[in-house]
């Protein structure tokens, strides 16, 4: 479920006068209006002119009644001339830590990563990121700017890995009374390319960030330390991000067709149309039709798949380690001599379903860690399935969206599953042991961790109305 936790880095830059910048700022973190954690932002300047910027965010969440803790720590060091020197990042969850260390050496950055107990090293061109990029808000509000003033920036993201470009623009100016004094406050809109996520920040004329609102869901609010750290586990992120329905849907797993109407901040990036689902805009709403796939008469391609148009979905990544000997061996064990890609996909789906225990977790998931623990929620099921499929020579990628779940609170809940190429793309859900995903799956994003981040601005803000429950026969 970690996809819901990720948010773009918007630092608490206060002023290009580093003397006034030094020190700590504390922020409460709110998810959909409920206190869910806190964050400490710190700027330090050493005697040699080196500047260190630290972010330390901690989340305390409830997932289906299970308390979850998660920490996201980042430390960035800049030389006296402002150029990036090092990037440290660590993600801690109940299963351990993922660590990243990028060190600039000449015109290269050497990135050391430890994910799921596996260590790796990668060399890439020196990032363009500078201290000015880190303190972009202070730069933007300097000199009494007007609405429309803007700048571009870059930030190096170790988990991608690579640089992400962004754009900040002043979209409003207002006056507030802070500590008894009238203070000019700038409203700044920041967007990160590729991820499609926007943050609205409220920054004083001296550069102090009062509040960030990311994707309309995650709020970071300046608070005294003791208030910021006052967090309990009352926010159940599974329920708070669900789209409830007024009445249960009959036969949700076996029906042939389902018609829904969705309302919320959907964009063209979320409108996936294929053989299984169709989404189209109708006024201020979106019509969804889900249809059960029929593969009668379809001949699947043989394994291993050798097709250039889908070859990128066979490559290992930092979190999908399908080139690891343990994953390769497990894939061979499950698939055996089966060469039919459709049958192989079903074998992998069934194995993951039967062997991975369902445990809700807020984690930065990777396939090797899941193979070792054999537990997790839908994200763990899907990422292990994807790794095993790729190891078997079957192109695969992750998918994110909503799925209908009944019970005490029937509705559409955040969910992840997978797609595989068997001569055409099909949706597979290893969490539910569905070689062909049922009609209640609403696909809204697909691809790697950062491509899936496009779903962040809309999860928890979508309303679903059942228009027609077509016959399940």
Image: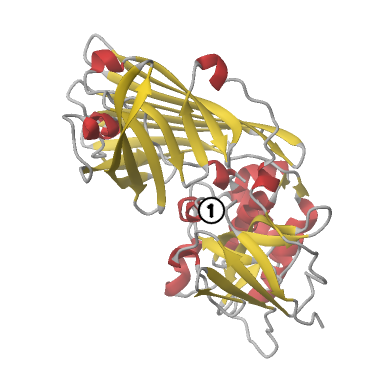
- On screen, residue 165 above or below 301: above
Label 1's element? loop
| Residue at 60% from the left image edge and 60% from the top image edge | 401
Residue at which label 1 appears: 323
* Position above or below: 193 against 151: below
| Quarter of the figure that contains the C terminus | bottom right
The color scheme shown is secondary structure
Q: Quadrant of residue 385?
A: bottom right
Can you tell which quarter of the image residue 122 is in? top left
Q: Residue at x 40, y 37 (%)?
A: 9
Q: Is residue 185 left or right of residue 445?
A: left
Can you see residue 346?
yes
Residue 340 seen in render: no
Quadrant of res 295: bottom right
Q: Which of the pair 325/410 is nearer the observer?
A: 410
Give the vertical position of 330 relative to 186 (above or below): below
Q: Position of residue 370 (x, y in %)?
A: 66, 45
């Amino acid at each position: 479920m970690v996809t819901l936790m990720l948010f773009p880095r918007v630092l608490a830059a206060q002023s290009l006068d580093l003397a006034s910048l030094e020190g700590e700022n504390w922020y409460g973190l709110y998810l959909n209006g409920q206190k869910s954690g806190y964050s400490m932002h710190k700027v330090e300047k050493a005697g040699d002119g080196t500047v260190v910027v630290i972010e330390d965010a901690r989340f305390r969440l409830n997932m289906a009644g299970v308390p979850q803790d998660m920490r996201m720590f980042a430390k960035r060091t800049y030389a006296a001339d402002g150029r990036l020197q090092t990037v440290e990042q660590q993600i801690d969850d109940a299963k351990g830590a993922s660590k990243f260390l990028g060190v600039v050496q000449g015109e290269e950055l050497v990135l050391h990563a430890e994910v799921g107990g596996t260590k790796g090293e990668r060399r890439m061109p020196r990032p363009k990121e500078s201290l000015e990029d880190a303190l972009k808000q202070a730069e933007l509000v300097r000199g009494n700017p007007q609405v429309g003033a803007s700048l571009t920036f870059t930030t190096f993201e170790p988990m991608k890995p690579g640089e992400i470009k962004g754009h900040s623009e002043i979209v409003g100016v207002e006056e507030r009374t802070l500590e008894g004094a009238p203070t000019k406050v700038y409203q700044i809109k920041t967007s990160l390319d590729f991820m499609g996520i926007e943050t609205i920040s409220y920054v004083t004329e001296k550069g102090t960030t009062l509040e960030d609102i990311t994707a309309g869901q995650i709020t970071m609010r300046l608070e005294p330390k003791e208030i910021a750290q006052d967090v309990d586990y009352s926010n159940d992120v599974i329920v708070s991000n669900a789209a409830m329905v007024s009445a249960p849907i009959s036969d949700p797993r076996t029906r042939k067709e389902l018609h829904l109407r969705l309302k919320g901040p959907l964009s063209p990036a979320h409108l996936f149309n294929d053989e299984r689902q169709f989404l189209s805009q109708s006024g201020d709403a979106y019509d969804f039709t889900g249809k059960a796939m029929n593969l009668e008469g379809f001949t699947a391609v043989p394994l291993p798949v050798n097709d250039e148009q889908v070859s990128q979905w066979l490559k290992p990544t930092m979190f999908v380690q399908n080139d690891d000997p343990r994953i390769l061996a497990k894939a061979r064990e499950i698939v055996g001599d089966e060469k039919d890609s459709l049958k192989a996909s079903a074998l992998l789906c069934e194995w993951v379903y039967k062997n991975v225990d369902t445990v809700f977790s807020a984690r930065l998931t990777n396939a090797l860690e899941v193979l070792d623990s054999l537990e997790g929620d839908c994200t763990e099921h899907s990422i292990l399935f994807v790794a095993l499929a790729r190891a078997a020579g079957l192109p695969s990628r992750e998918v994110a969206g909503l799925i209908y779940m009944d019970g005490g609170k029937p509705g559409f809940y955040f969910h992840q599953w997978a797609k595989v190429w068997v001569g055409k793309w099909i949706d597979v859900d290893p969490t539910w042991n569905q070689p062909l995903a049922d009609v209640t799956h609403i696909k809204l994003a697909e691809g790697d961790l950062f491509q899936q981040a496009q779903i962040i601005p809309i999860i928890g803000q979508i309303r679903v109305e059942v228009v027609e429950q077509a016959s399940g026969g």
